Image (spheres, grey):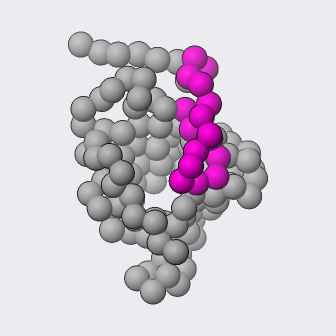
Amino acid sequence: MYDRVNLSDLELHENTIADGRVRAVGYELRPKQMRPSVWVFEPGEQSTKHYQEEQEELYHVLSGRFEMAFSDDEGDETETLTLESGDVVVVSPDEVRQLTCLDAGEVFIVGAPNTKDDGVVVD
């Protein structure tokens, strides 16, 4: 069995937890083991600084250019990656991260396991 959707057929929804908009791939396809979505950003927009309680996250840059900053437990930045179209990064649940858009683009993000409201925002 399989389910299929084309990103161009999905509505772009405003997001309440971060800048940018989201194409809710997971809502449309309803996978049991993962939470996929496509986030759409304009330059300067960013995700919240967060970590996950359980979910490992995969980020695949579809277009544009981004920075992904990692922080330690005190909130101090420890490393920054520049990500471009085609780059893929997997981040462990406990790693504090924040994605910032440099050039308008889209990022395909998959969290697994499929755990609702797993993210913990860091101030």
Instruction: Residue at 39% x, 58% y: name it.
Output: 119
The residue positioned farthest toward the front in the image shown: 16
Q: Is residue 104 in sight in this rendering?
A: yes
Residue 81 location (% of width, % of height): 57, 65
Residue at 24% over, 37% down: 33
Residue 58, image x and y in percent? 41, 48
**Number of residue marks:** 0
Can residue 87 be found in the magenta stretch?
A: no
Residue 78 in view (yes/no): no
Quadrant of residue 91 in the image?
A: bottom left
**Is residue 95 found left or right of 2 in the rendered image?**
right
Q: Is residue 45 above or below residue 105?
A: below
Q: Is residue 67 left or right of residue 109?
A: right
Q: Residue furthest top?
A: 1
- Residue occupying image coordinates x 28% and y 42%: 114
Front residue of this view, candidates 59 and 12: 12
Which corner quadrant holds the N terminus? top left
- Residue 21 highlighted magenta (yes or no): yes
Counting from the top left corner in percent of width and height, residue 2 is at: 30, 15
Question: Which residue is at the front of the view, 78 or 33?
Answer: 33
Q: Is residue 113 above or below residue 13?
A: below
Residue displayed at 59% across by 25% down: 11
Can you tell which quarter of the image residue 86 is in?
top right
From the viewer's perspective, tell me whether residue 36 is left or right of residue 83. left
Boundaries of the magenta span:
8-23
Answer with the quarter of the image where residue 93 lies: bottom left
